[in-house]
Amino acid sequence: MMNIALDGPSGAGKSTLAKALAKKLGYIYTDTGAMYRTIGLAVKRRCIEPTDTDAVAAALPEIKISLRFENGEQKIYLGEEDVGGLIRTNEISAYASKVSAIPAVRAHLLDVQRTIAKENNVIMDGRDIGTVILPHAQVKFFVTVSDAERARRRYNELIAKGENVTLEEVATAMAERDRQDSTREIAPAIPAEDAIFLDNSGDFDAVIDLAIAIIRDKAKEAGETV
Ligand code: DC
């Protein structure tokens, strides 16, 4: 199976890139951030503090997350509820970042994510895919974009959803979340030693073409067909 890790900070355009690549290659796209967000949502609904390690860990067995593919699109379910439309708010981003620092949460999702990668040709988007989840992925990308451009993109997304935020608030929240994500003790969001940096600030089609060329080369080296 071809396993492609796509890591990088929030707002770097990983999901757009990963979806486009998965479509071109006929691979499964897995958005691991959505899994942490869904745990964040479930924790909030239970009125649990996202920093309360023991309470979050105790709730995990009741939090049933599943990815389903419907009409070629990935949907994320909490139990039988499609929560895709509820997990991309600033509030849930903060919950997700906090619960993602809890070892029990990461251990819980590690198995789910590895199983998907074992059974499918996959492009997995996250923070620790190349370093922890799929250390043997044939291709590891680390996606980068300037901080200002990342904040602008996330701001536009939130405004389009009708959230009442300023660009400055978004930039500050993003910087805080990046700081938490990259300095935490467990699975910090850092590039794998063998990661290939992909600058996603410029022309999207050019980035896709470059990524596809790299994937084809790496697949050939690994004796896989693309
Ligand atoms: O990619 P995203 O913004 O949807 O991620 C939501 C949060 O989950 C973010 O704070 C980082 C965290 N995360 C993580 O710790 N590990 C992953 N593999 C994916 C996301």
Image (tube, rainbow, N blue to C red):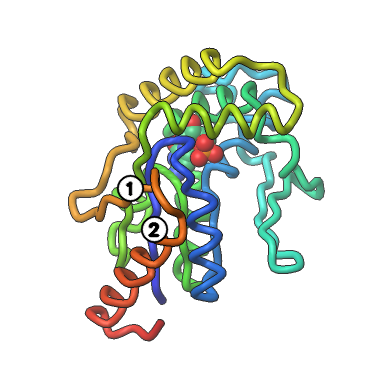
Classify the position of the C terminus by image quarter: bottom left
Residue 106 visible in this rendered orientation of the protein: no
Residue at the image point whose x is 47% and y is 23% from the top: 174
Q: Tell me which numbered mark, 2 or 1, is placed earlier along the sequence.
A: 1
Question: Callout 2: few (<14), some (14-19), or many (20+) C-alpha neighbours within 10 Å?
Answer: some
Furthest residue toward front: 203
Q: Position of residue 28 (x, y in %)?
A: 55, 67
* The quarter of the displayed image where residue 206 is located: bottom left
Residue 131, placed above or below residue 21:
above
**Is there CB contact under 8 Å for labels 2 and 1?**
yes
Which residue is label 2 attached to?
Answer: 207
Q: Position of residue 40 (x, y in %)?
A: 62, 30
In this rendering, position of residue 98 left or right of residue 92: left
Which residue is label 1 attached to?
Answer: 199
Q: Position of residue 135 (x, y in %)?
A: 29, 57
Residue at the image point whose x is 55% and y is 13% from the top: 169
Q: Nearer the viewer, residue 125 or 100?
A: 125
**C-alpha separation, residue under disc 2 versus residue under disc 1:** 8 Å
**Under tag 2, what secondary structure?**
helix
Q: Nearer the viewer, residue 156 or 66?
A: 156
Q: Amino acid at mark 1?
A: Asp
Q: Nearer the viewer, residue 46 or 32?
A: 32
In this rendering, position of residue 163 left or right of residue 221: right
The yes-or-no answer for disc 2 within 8 Å of ligand 1 is no
Residue at the image point whose x is 45% and y is 69% from the top: 118
